[in-house]
Image (spheres, helix red, strand yellow):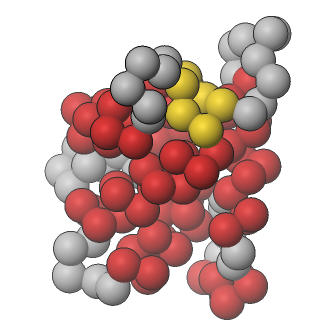
């Protein structure tokens, strides 16, 4: 986990490692370039994004469907970042978007 003091050094590439690790989880043929819905849900559970109140498993599934391409079954890294921002807005409505996204990403990292 990234600590609060490291937030100032955060960059969008900070979550690329976790994205790739979860993207290949349980799939020996995966390239790490895209992530399926099952692994997206696992990342959200394991990283504490799903809290059962502000963010539920249903929210996570809806966001996945919203950011992916219509006929796709996976999301790209760029869509992954978009999904994190979407969840951040939902969970932390009273905070600024950047701050909210950093909180979510801190959990992922």
- Placement of the C terminus among the 4 image quadrants: bottom right
**Residue 31: image x %, image y %?**
81, 24
Q: Residue at x 45, y 70 (%)?
A: 101
Left or right placement of residue 105 versus residue 89 in this view: right
* 65 or 3: nearer the viewer: 65
Identify whether 47 is placed above or below 46.
below
* 24 or 65: nearer the viewer: 65
Q: Which residue is drawn at 52% across and 74% down?
A: 102
Q: Which residue is drawn at 78% across and 49% down?
A: 17
- Placement of the N terminus among the 4 image quadrants: bottom right
**Residue 34: image x %, image y %?**
66, 31
Left or right placement of residue 86 versus residue 105 in this view: left
Left or right placement of residue 41 versus residue 3 in this view: left
Identify whether 5 is placed above or below 12.
below
Q: Which residue is drawn at 43% across and 50% down?
A: 83
* 35 or 7: nearer the viewer: 35
Identify whether 38 is placed above or below 47.
above
Q: Can residue 60 be seen in this view?
A: no
**Residue 10: image x %, image y %?**
69, 78
């Amino acid at each position: 986990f990234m600590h609060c003091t490291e937030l100032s050094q955060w960059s969008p590439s900070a979550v690329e490692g976790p994205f790739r690790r979860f993207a290949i989880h349980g799939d020996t043929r995966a390239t790490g370039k895209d992530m399926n819905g099952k692994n997206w849900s696992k990342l959200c559970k394991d990283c504490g994004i799903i809290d059962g109140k502000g963010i539920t498993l249903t929210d996570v599934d809806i966001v996945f469907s919203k950011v992916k391409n219509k006929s796709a079954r996976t999301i790209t890294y760029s869509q992954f970042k978009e999904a994190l921002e979407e969840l951040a807005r939902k969970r932390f409505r009273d905070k600024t978007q950047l701050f909210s996204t950093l909180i979510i990403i801190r959990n992922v990292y």
